Amino acid sequence: MRRAQAVLLWGAAAVLLVLAFAAVFPGVLATHDPLQTDVRASLLPPSADHLFGTDQSGRDVFSRVVYGAGRSIGIGLLATGVALAVGLIVGSLAGLAPRGVDAALMRVNDVLMAFPEFLVALVVVAVLGPGPVNIAIAVTLAAVPVYIRLARVQTRTLRGAEHVEAARILGVRPVPAFVRHVVPGVLGSLSVVATIGIGSSILAAAGLSFLGLGPSEPTPEWGLMLAGGRNVLGQAWWIAVFPGIAITITVISATIVGRVLRARAEGLTP
């Protein structure tokens, strides 16, 4: 790995660690109560007292960005984790199923993959209704088809591998052989893709919140903060810009780490 790429990787990893700390321990980094309002201090620009300025209600934007990390990143992690688990189960079963069942499952999966993930999530939220829980469900369902496809391909590849055949020859039953020798390989491939998928899930969740389909005020959430600052962008740019920067940095950092891990898993030099 070249030096510049190594610096980029470690920089991205450091950003993710800081964001993870903010998500778990927001009170340590936040300088104010994210829900405390003060109309007299509304729309103040960034300063020593308010690092990212204040919003229309006088709430500290920096503290709201810090507390928003927990919700935004949490939805991304939850959606990606559930999508990975569902994709592993359904994709593995498809890879082991008879040709007819496999073909039917993959045709349905191909139809879902033909639509952009955000559009699928938007349709799901439109059916279920707005709210943070429904956003998590929508983002999960939108991401599942990718993991199903990959799990199915990896299962079909690994089930005929030499070490799996050797285990069967040695008398290991099909189910234990599959669990011990196929599932870890499939899960490893899915985990690498999931690292990139976390960024996509965070972006999708923020987009839905921006459209007013997620948490409601005064909840500190990055997409909701973007929506709250769009109407005063010319007067108070900081209300929308800093949450937008947080989303961008998070997605880029997760993507960088995920791509490097995928390159290493494939035996390439990133």
Image: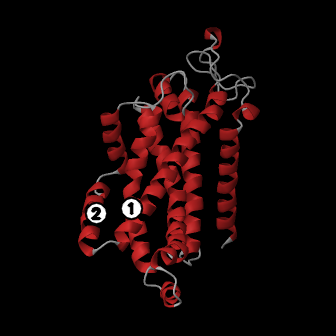
Q: Residue at x 48, y 57 (%)?
A: 85
Q: Residue at x 61, y 10 (%)?
A: 39
Comparing 70 with 177, the one in front is: 177
Q: Quick check: 50 left or right of 241?
A: right
Quadrant of the snapshot with the C terminus: bottom right
Q: Which residue is mark 2?
A: 105
Callout 1: helix, strand or loop?
helix
Q: Residue 50 in the image: x percent, y percent?
A: 70, 24
Q: Residue at x 76, y 34 (%)?
A: 28
The amino acid type of the residue labelled 2 equals Leu
Q: Which residue is mark 1?
A: 90
Q: Quick check: 21 left or right of 241?
A: right
Task: Classify 239 as above or below 111.
Answer: above
Q: CA distance from mark 2 to mark 1?
A: 9 Å
Q: Residue at x 38, y 48 (%)?
A: 141
Q: Quick check: 66 left or right of 145?
A: right
Q: Residue 19 in the image: x percent, y percent?
A: 66, 44
Comparing 237 with 150, the one in front is: 150
The amino acid type of the residue labelled 1 equals Val
Mark 2 and mark 1 lie on one chain; the one further toward the N terminus is: 1
> Could you tell me if the residues under marks 2 and 1 are in contact, i.e. CB atoms within 8 Å?
yes
Q: How is the image coloured?
A: secondary structure
Callout 2: helix, strand or loop?
helix
Comparing 46 with 255, the one in front is: 255
Q: Could you classify mark 1 by the number of other residues whose Cα lies within 10 Å: few (under 14), some (14-19), or many (20 or more)?
A: some
Q: Could you classify mark 2 by the number of other residues whose Cα lies within 10 Å: few (under 14), some (14-19), or many (20 or more)?
A: some
Task: Classify 81 as above or below 171.
Answer: above
Q: Residue 208 in the image: x percent, y percent?
A: 41, 36
